[in-house]
């Protein structure tokens, strides 16, 4: 019998996925879900044929270029690949894949929830009942007033699959759809969404009521919402981010919210994850921001579909075919 390839999985995956991996491969699983240290990952690549990391595992050039690195493939369990040095892997002949398309609807759902949460003060209101900070005396005509979102302008930064899915949901709530992207979407899509394209991100930011960040993190989008650009945002506007924390200059965002120069924010991702800036926590307690622990894609269905994509990519590669979700440096 041909020896099964050794596949090292860095984190706990859904049971059905792990079971299938054990059937198909010599799978080394992480049953207690303790994150692997950089040293453990560096050791793993010396024996594994395939590494299955997640978005929190940094697979950098120094790991890939170890003289005794045995890897033939990195099958990322995640839509993004900003945790992997794709260029170094490609130069070494290591195939890199990801799991695109399966998280679009889940992430768009969460983005829409956050778009609603800030103006309607959902988290702030819920905490009054659950945390007992103040007595709720009942309904009042002037208490806990928020803002309606119908008729407001939504500026989407990044009009890929997720950005378009957010736009469809937002349009149903009566929001006016605006977007900035590297290039305009197809005319048919723009017409369907009633979307206005802004070639200048600066000009769009200065005119929106809500900014939704839906672009990937790449070297080109690091601090895309820089200190200079954040200062263009209107005082009444707020920022929603379910993409990657590194896209926003988080320190400047905090300062502007503290000073009342930006209305607020709803964040599911953070620049120095898993660390969350204590100043953000204080702003959340003051009702200025809504914070979630990177839950945008956290559905059972989504995680299983991600795992199935990982398996398909590995099996296709091992059968000497091009994996359907291969990532090349030229794509980033």
Image (spheres, rainbow, N blue to C red):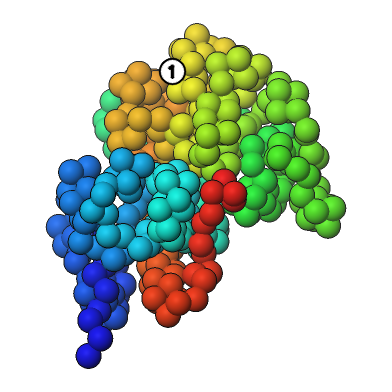
Q: Which residue is mark 1?
A: 251
User: Label 1: few (<14), some or many (≥20) within 10 Å?
Assistant: some
Nearest the viewer among 223 and 287 is: 223
Up the image or down, 105 lies above or below 121; here it is below
The answer to whether residue 306 is seen in the rendering is: yes
Q: Residue furthest top?
A: 259
Secondary structure category for the residue under label 1: helix
**Residue at (35%, 63%) from the top-left corner?**
72
Q: Residue furthest bottom?
A: 1
**Residue at (78%, 44%) from the top-left corner?**
184
Nearest the viewer among 118 and 45 is: 45
Q: Residue furthest front?
A: 67
Q: Is residue 307 left or right of residue 198?
A: left
Estimate the x, y position of residue 180 in percent, counting from the top left: 71, 36
Q: Residue furthest left?
A: 32
Nearest the viewer among 260 and 139 is: 260
Q: Is residue 14 left or right of residue 184?
A: left
Estimate the x, y position of residue 147 in percent, counting from the top left: 61, 30
**Residue at (52%, 30%) from the top-left corner?**
222
**Residue at (21%, 56%) from the top-left corner?**
46
Q: Is residue 168 left or right of residue 36?
A: right
Estimate the x, y position of residue 206 in percent, counting from the top left: 71, 21
């Amino acid at each position: 019998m041909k020896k099964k390839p050794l596949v090292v999985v860095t984190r706990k995956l859904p049971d059905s996925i792990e079971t299938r991996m054990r059937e198909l491969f010599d799978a080394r699983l992480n049953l207690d879900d303790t994150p692997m240290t950089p040293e453990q990952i560096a050791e793993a690549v010396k024996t594994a044929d395939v590494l299955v990391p997640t978005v929190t595992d940094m697979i950098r050039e120094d790991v890939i270029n170890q003289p005794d690195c045995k890897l033939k493939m990195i099958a990322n369990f995640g839509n993004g690949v900003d945790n992997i040095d794709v260029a170094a892997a490609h130069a070494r002949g290591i195939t890199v894949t990801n799991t695109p398309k399966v998280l679009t609807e889940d992430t768009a759902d969460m983005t829409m929830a956050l778009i609603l949460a800030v103006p309607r003060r959902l988290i702030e209101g819920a905490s009054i009942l659950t945390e007992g900070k103040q007595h709720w005396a009942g309904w009042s005509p002037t208490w806990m007033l928020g803002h309606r979102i119908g008729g407001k302008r939504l500026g989407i930064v990044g009009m890929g699959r997720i950005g378009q899915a957010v736009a469809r949901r937002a349009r149903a709530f009566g929001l006016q759809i605006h977007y900035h992207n590297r290039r305009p979407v197809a005319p048919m899509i723009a017409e369907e969404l009633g979307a206005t394209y802004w070639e200048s991100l600066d000009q769009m930011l200065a005119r929106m009521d809500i900014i939704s960040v839906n672009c990937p993190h790449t070297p080109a989008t690091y601090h895309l919402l820089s200190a200079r650009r954040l200062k263009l945002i209107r005082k009444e506007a707020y920022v929603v981010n379910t993409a990657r924390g590194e896209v926003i200059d988080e320190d400047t965002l905090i300062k502007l919210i503290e000073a009342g120069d930006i209305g607020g924010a709803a964040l599911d991702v953070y620049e120095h994850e898993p660390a969350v800036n204590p100043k953000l926590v204080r702003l959340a307690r003051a009702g200025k921001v809504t914070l979630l622990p990177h839950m945008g894609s956290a559905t059972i269905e989504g995680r299983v579909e991600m795992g199935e994509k990982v398996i398909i990519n590995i099996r296709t590669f091992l059968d000497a075919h091009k994996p359907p979700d291969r990532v090349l440096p030229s794509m980033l």
